[in-house]
Image: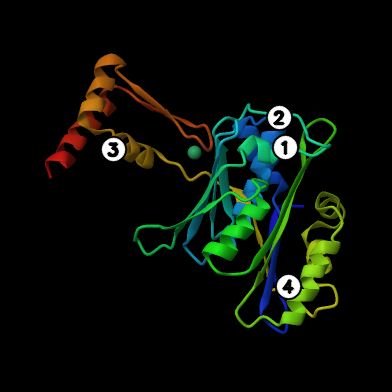
Amino acid sequence: MADQMIRAPCLTGGVRILACDIREAAREICQLQQTSPTATIALSRGLTGGALMGALMKDGQRTALKFEGNGPLTKMIVEADYDGAIRGCVGNPAADLPPVQKKWNVSGLIGKAGFLTVSKDLGFGGAPYQGVVQLVSSEIGEDIAYYLTDSEQTPTAVGVTAALGENGELVTAGGFLVQALPKADDDVIEKILKNIDDLPPLATLFAEEGPEGVIRKLFGDIPSTILETHGIFFRCGCEAPKVERALLTLGTEDLQELLNSEGKAEVTCEFCRKAYHFGTPELEALILQASGEQGQ
Ligand SMILES: [Zn+2]
């Protein structure tokens, strides 16, 4: 089954639930990043959270989540577009930690002290909106819920899960997001909160019943409907002109130094690991362009 995001509102209004399965995309991204087992779990949880945040965006918008903590992973960035495209990278993919009480030590890998920065490009061509919160548990789901509840003032619960199979391959990556909207009925919220508490272990639930099963369990006997289902997939979106623009920000002096010392430049995309090569003629053209831009 292909990766998907399901959007399900409560029929009496006021509460929406999103649930997604992003296993295939997460597996592809973790392979590109060559993540250790614990980093695979961390990045898969992060990508799930990113996909859920992306599904809150409107046409043409995109969002980016940056987790920066004092753990060995150093940082994790996930980005999601309104159309279901996701990508992600981590600072130190080889970083790994032994489990604690048979649980993946994601909080240790990210580090308890740090920040979650959420950027949103709302597609109006203006500067992206940015919000920052402290990491609350560094387990990813709680941190995203805290950001949405505290920074965006929308009471939100988030659950994300990832699991590896016997051979170390990613077999589960998915999650849910529950939001109480301004007109939410207190009884409905109370019931859903109880249903969240009563959920079986999320990885098992996803493996057995998928995102539809999670939505069914969260709503329980509350009337709801499935509004929409759309695909989630990996897409990097990097391209030569964007890499050139990044190189241009180095300025003429640094570019000239690069030309003198190396005669070429190689830039690797941190998300998809694609290498972009710039030879002497390309660097000379960039220096000309940079000096023109500086002269303006
Ligand atoms: Zn790329």
- Can the viewer see residue 294 in this picture? yes
**Foreground disc of the pair 1, 3:** 1
Q: Quadrant for residue 256, please give it.
A: top left
| Helix, strand or loop under label 2 | loop
Q: Residue at x 65, y 31 (%)?
A: 35
**Foreground disc of the pair 3, 2:** 2
| Helix, strand or loop under label 4 | loop
Q: Single out the residue that lies furthest toward the left.
A: 295
Return the mark for residue 105: 1
- Residue 176 at x, y percent in the picture: 71, 60
Q: Earlier in the sequence, mark 3 or mark 2?
A: 2
Q: Is residue 258 above or below residue 153?
A: above
User: Which of 262 and 2 lies nearest the eye of the viewer?
Assistant: 262
Return the mark for residue 249: 3
Disc 1 + disc 3, Cβ < 8 Å: no
Q: Single out the residue that lies furthest toward the front.
A: 113
Return the mark for residue 97: 2
* Side (left or right) of 83 relative to 262: right
Q: Earlier in the sequence, mark 4 or mark 1?
A: 1
Q: Earlier in the sequence, mark 2 or mark 1?
A: 2
Q: Quadrant of the C terminus?
A: top left
Disc 2 + disc 1, Cβ < 8 Å: yes
- The residue that disc 4 covers is 226
Disc 4 + disc 2, Cβ < 8 Å: no
Q: Give neighbour class at mark 1: few <14, some 14-19, many 20+ (Cα, 10 Å).
A: many
Distance from the alpha carbon under mark 4 to that under mark 3: 46 Å
